[in-house]
Image: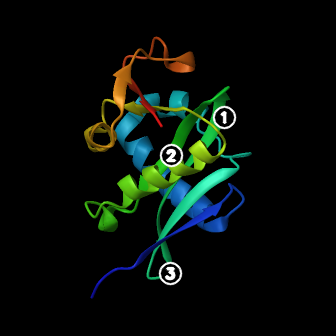
Amino acid sequence: MNDMTEFKRTDSANEDFRFLVSLLDEELAKRDGDEHAFYHQFNKIENLNQVIIAYANEKPVGCGAFKNYKPQVVEIKRMFVLPGHRGKGIAGQILQQLEFWAAEFNNSTCILETGKKQPEAIALYRKSGYKIIPNYGQYENVENSVCMEKKI
C-alpha cells in the first residue's frame, strides 16, 4: 500500500499541530535532559502563523513552521515527524514546503537552530542545502546548539 502524503498550510491554533508539538517536546525533553528548560523557552508556538502539517492517510504525521526573524529572513521552527514515519522523506518535504511559502513573502534566507544531540536533524538539513553558521541570537554561547542557514 502506498502512503499518500498531503501537506496543509495552517497556523499554531491547529489541534493536529498542537498534538505533534506535544510529542516533539516529549522527545526533546528526553534528548536534551537538563538543558530542555533552556531550549523550551524559545519554542513557544503561540503566534506561529505559518505552519505546515503532513498527513499520511489523513492522519497527522509531521509538522514544521517558520516565523519572521528579521527582514527577508525566517526561522524554521518545530520540525517533527512521528517515529514510525521517519526515513520516508516527509521531513525534507515539509522543509521544502516551508521554504516555498517563505519565498512567497519575498524572504531570501531560512535560518534554524538544532542540537548536537540530533544528528538525524543535522543530516536532513545538510542534505537539504543548509550550511552551518555561527550561532545566532539566544543560542550564541550555547554549547549544544547548531545553527544553520540556506538561501532560498
- State the residue at coordinates (46%, 11%): 141
Amino acid, disc 1: Asn
Q: Name the mark on residue 68.
A: 1
Front position among marks 1 and 2: 2
Tags 3 and 2 touching, CB below 8 Å = no
The numbered dot on residue 58 is 3
- Which residue is identified by label 2? 99
Going 66% across and 42% down the picture, which residue do you hit? 105
The amino acid beneath tag 3 is Glu
Q: Residues within 10 Å of mark 2 (few under 14, many from 20)?
A: many
What SS does tag 1 mark? strand
N-terminal of the two: label 3 or label 1? Answer: 3
Residue 112 numbered mark, or none? none
How far from the left and from the top, in percent, is residue 103? Answer: 58, 43
Q: Taking the image as drawn, is residue 45 in sight?
A: yes
Q: Residue at x 54, y 54 (%)?
A: 21
Residue 83 % position (x, y)? 33, 62
- Give the quadrant of residue 120: top left
